[in-house]
Image (cartoon, helix red, strand yellow):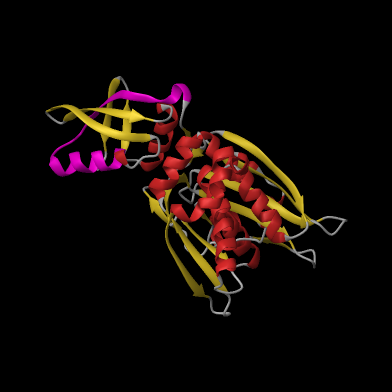
C-alpha cells in the first residue's frame, strides 16, 4: 500500500492539554489520473485508512462487517474532489460521512475513536549519514515525515521550538540518551497530554531503527521497530502510539456496554444557551446515541443518556475536552462553558 499523505487534517488546540481533530473524516490519496478505475482504487484505499484512523487499530481491517462493506465504500462518502499540489501531483480528496461511519462501526462492534484526542509532544532525534545527531522539529525533513505519519493516524502533535532555553533544558545528547528527568523538564514548557520520544538511526544492515516510548496517563509504553525506509518506520511508530491510545479512548458498542437509560446530573447551567450547548455537546460524543432531559432545577439538569459503550470509557474522552468536570464529594458533573 502506498504511503498516504493526509493533506486535509488539522489540529485545533482545545484548552490546555487535548486537541480536537478537524478533518478527521477527510482522506487524501495520490492518484495517477481521473479515470473511473483510478478513482475506485483510491476510494478503496481511503476507506482502509479511514478504518484504521477512526478505530486507532489496524486489526479493525480484519473485522468481517467492515471488510465486507469495502465494496460499498462510496455509499459512506459525502464528496469527492481532485486537487494538485505545487509539484503538479494529483490527489483524490475523499470526505466520509461521520454519521454513516459511526453507525457502521457500531453495527460491526468495532472501536470508534472520536475527534477529541490527546495532544502529544514529540521529542525525537535522528542520527544522520554523517553521524551528526539532530533534534526533530516541524521544519526538518524528519520532522515532516513523523508529522505526516501522526496525521495519517489522526494524532494531534506539536514539536518544541528548540529555542535557546529548550536546548539548555534538553541538549541533543541528553535527548539521544533518553534521560527522563531532562525530557520531563522540557515537557513542562509545552501543554501536552503525552510525550512521544525516541531516536532514529541506521543499523549495520542499512535499515532504519527506532527506540523510544509513549508516555501518557502515568504509563510508559516502549516503542521499538525496524523498517527499510524512513516513511515506513515513522508510520509504524505512529500506528503503535495510536493503537495504545485508542485502547483507552475508543468506544466499542455492543454486548453489555449498551445502556439506554444512563442518568447524569449537570450543574452550572445558568441560562438556556448553556443548556443547549450542553445538550449539543453530549449528543456529539462518540458512544452517546441520544440525550433526554428529565428534570431541571435551579442551575442543575438531570439527563438520561442512551449509550452504546461503557460510560467510564466515554467519560475518559470527555475529560480531554475540559467541558465537564467532577468535583470531590459531589455526584454531579459541572458544566464549564
Q: Is residue 207 above or below residue 223?
A: below
From the viewer's side, name the closer residue of 143 and 289.
289
Q: Position of residue 157 (x, y in %)?
A: 52, 53
Residue that appears at 51% across and 36% down: 108
From the viewer's side, name the closer residue of 251 and 109.
109
From the viewer's side, name the closer residue of 24 and 50.
50
Residue at the right extreme, as displayed: 204
Q: Is residue 184 among what the camera can see?
A: no
Q: Is residue 232 among what the camera can see?
A: yes
In screen coordinates, is 187 left or right of 142? left
Is residue 276 shown in magenta?
yes
Q: Position of residue 41 (x, y in %)?
A: 60, 61
Residue that appears at 43% across and 30% down: 309
Q: Position of residue 87 (x, y in %)?
A: 58, 79
**Res. 228 image quadrant:** bottom right
Residue at the top extreme, as displayed: 329
Q: Which residues are magenta?
A: 255-282
From the viewer's side, name the closer residue of 329 and 104.
104
In screen coordinates, is 201 left or right of 217? right
Q: Position of residue 274 (x, y in %)?
A: 19, 42
In screen coordinates, is 251 left or right of 181? left
Residue that appears at 40% across and 30% down: 308
Quarter containing the N terminus: bottom right
Is residue 134 shown in magenta?
no
Quarter containing the C terminus: top left
Q: Is residue 42 above or below residue 33?
A: above
Q: Total marks drawn? A: 0
Amino acid at each position: 500500500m502506498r504511503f498516504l499523505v493526509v493533506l486535509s487534517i488539522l489540529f485545533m488546540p482545545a484548552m490546555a492539554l487535548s486537541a480536537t481533530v478537524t478533518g478527521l473524516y477527510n482522506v487524501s490519496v495520490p492518484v495517477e489520473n481521473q479515470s473511473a478505475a483510478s478513482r475506485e482504487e483510491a476510494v478503496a484505499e481511503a476507506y482502509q485508512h479511514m478504518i484504521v484512523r477512526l478505530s486507532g487499530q489496524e486489526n479493525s481491517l480484519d473485522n468481517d462487517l467492515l471488510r465486507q462493506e469495502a465494496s460499498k465504500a462510496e455509499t459512506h462518502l459525502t464528496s469527492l474532489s481532485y486537487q494538485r499540489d505545487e509539484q503538479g501531483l494529483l490527489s483524490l480528496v475523499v470526505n466520509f460521512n461521520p454519521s454513516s461511519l459511526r453507525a457502521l462501526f457500531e453495527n460491526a462492534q468495532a472501536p470508534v475513536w472520536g475527534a477529541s484526542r490527546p495532544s502529544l509532544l514529540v521529542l525525537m532525534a535522528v542520527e544522520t549519514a554523517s553521524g551528526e545527531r539532530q533534534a526533530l522539529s516541524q521544519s526538518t525533513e524528519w520532522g515532516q515525515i513523523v508529522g505526516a505519519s501522526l496525521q495519517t493516524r489522526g494524532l494531534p502533535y506539536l514539536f518544541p521550538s528548540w529555542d535557546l532555553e529548550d536546548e539548555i533544558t534538553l541538549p541533543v545528547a541528553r535527548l539521544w540518551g533518553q534521560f527522563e528527568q531532562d525530557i520531563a523538564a522540557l515537557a513542562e514548557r509545552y501543554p501536552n497530554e503525552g510525550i512521544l520520544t525516541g531516536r532514529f538511526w541506521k543499523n549495520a544492515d542499512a535499515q532504519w531503527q527506532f527506540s523510544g516510548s509513549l508516555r501518557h496517563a502515568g504509563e510508559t509504553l516502549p516503542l521499538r521497530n525496524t523498517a527499510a525506509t524512513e516513511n515506513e518506520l515513522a508510520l509504524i511508530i505512529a500506528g503503535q502510539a495510536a493503537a495504545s491510545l485508542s485502547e483507552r479512548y475508543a468506544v466499542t458498542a455492543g454486548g453489555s456496554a449498551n445502556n439506554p437509560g444512563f442518568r447524569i446530573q449537570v450543574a452550572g447551567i445558568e441560562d438556556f444557551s448553556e443548556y443547549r450547548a450542553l445538550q449539543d455537546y453530549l449528543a456529539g460524543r462518540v458512544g452517546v446515541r441520544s440525550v433526554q432531559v428529565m428534570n431541571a432545577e435551579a442551575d442543575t439538569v438531570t439527563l438520561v443518556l442512551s449509550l452504546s459503550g461503557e460510560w467510564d470509557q466515554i467519560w475518559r474522552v470527555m475529560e480531554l475536552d475540559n467541558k465537564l468536570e467532577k468535583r470531590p464529594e459531589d455526584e454531579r458533573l459541572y458544566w464549564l462553558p
